Amino acid sequence: MRRLILLFFTDPESLNLVKEVAQQIKDQFDYAIGKTLVRLSNSECREQECNSGNVIADALVSHYIESTRKQKMSWTSAPIGLINGGTIRNSISVGSITIQDIISALPFGNMVGILKTNGSMIWKILEHSGSQHKMGGFLQVSGVRIEYDLSQPIRRRLRKVRVRCGDCDIPQYEDIDLSKTYEIVMTNYIAFGGDNYTMIDTNDFSTGSETDYYVFANYVKSFSPIYTGIEDRILFSSGDSENPSTTIQTEESIRTPTTTTKPSNSASSNKFNVSFMINSLIILNLYMTVKLFV
């Protein structure tokens, strides 16, 4: 196979074609879709609130606003967004945001969808996030205010949860209702049991048609310049703070995640086509590999 590839790329006509395509791909990746006035850091995303996690989680919620509006007085039915900190692989510096920046930050291309579940399950999910402190499964959030006490043992660290209302004309935060049904925007990685989020019933998750990097790119285009900061979405308290307003036993009922085939990304064409560029990386990487031998 290696010999066949080398034969193809040592042909001058074929090599010139690949060089041309590679340059086109590079131009697309260097295309600026917006800018940020602040550094979007990923260095803290596995252990505390990070501003890159905030803006990406906000992008997830924003993506579904129009499609989830149920009535005139409801701005969305999915006011909560969750993304695991380990998914965010790179920071984005102040200045222009390019396609390369987006994909470097979110390289895995997880599919975005909606989990419909009750407050009790949200509590269990967030409790598990507390057990993932300093690991990739620690969640970044939108539409949630959380308080943890890390001095407590695993599965008993979550102290308070307040959630943003969606069925309201003015969004505000209220104590989570364990029996109420909520809709949460997240990736299929979490929904299908990644980072041991095995308490989630995959039957309650509806996978969408867009990837996380595509959703983030569109958000940057729409809301540039970005200036998201730290907003006290995730707080840590000492053991002597007041009792939590809501408590629940959070022993996880372990389920084996259902194996589900990822839907194809049907992102609509725009000034950039993220799916095309990701697929084209195969050609680009192949070309760079061949350069080592020719």
Image (spheres, helix red, strand yellow):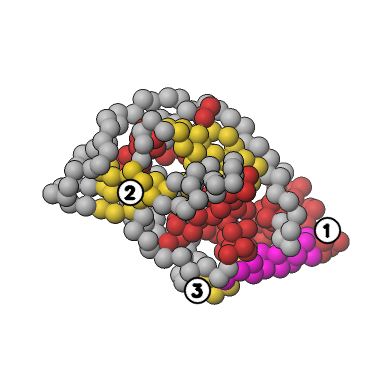
Residue bearing mark 3: 37
Instruction: Kindly tell me whether residue 283 is visible in this rendering.
Output: no
Q: Earlier in the sequence, mark 2 or mark 3?
A: 3
Q: Nearer the viewer, mark 1 or mark 2?
A: 2
Residue to which mark 2 is pinned: 146
Residue under the point 41% across and 52% down: 172
Q: Residue at x 64, y 67 (%)?
A: 33
CA–CA distance between discs 3 and 1?
43 Å
Residue lying at the far left in this picture: please name it. 240
Going 55% across and 70% down the picture, which residue do you hit?
Answer: 225
Stretch in magenta: 18-35
Which one is closest to the eye, mark 3 or mark 1?
A: 3
Tag 1 residue: 14
Q: Position of residue 161 (x, y in %)?
A: 33, 44
Residue 54 visible in the current orientation: yes
Residue depicted at 55% across the width and 59% down the height: 104
Q: Amino acid at mark 1?
A: Ser
Residue flagged by tag 2: what amino acid is it?
Answer: Ile
Q: Check disc 1: other Cα within 10 Å, few if <14, some if 14-19, many if 20+.
A: few
Quarter of the image with the N terminus is: top right
194, above or below 85, in the image = above
**Magenta run includes residue 284:** no
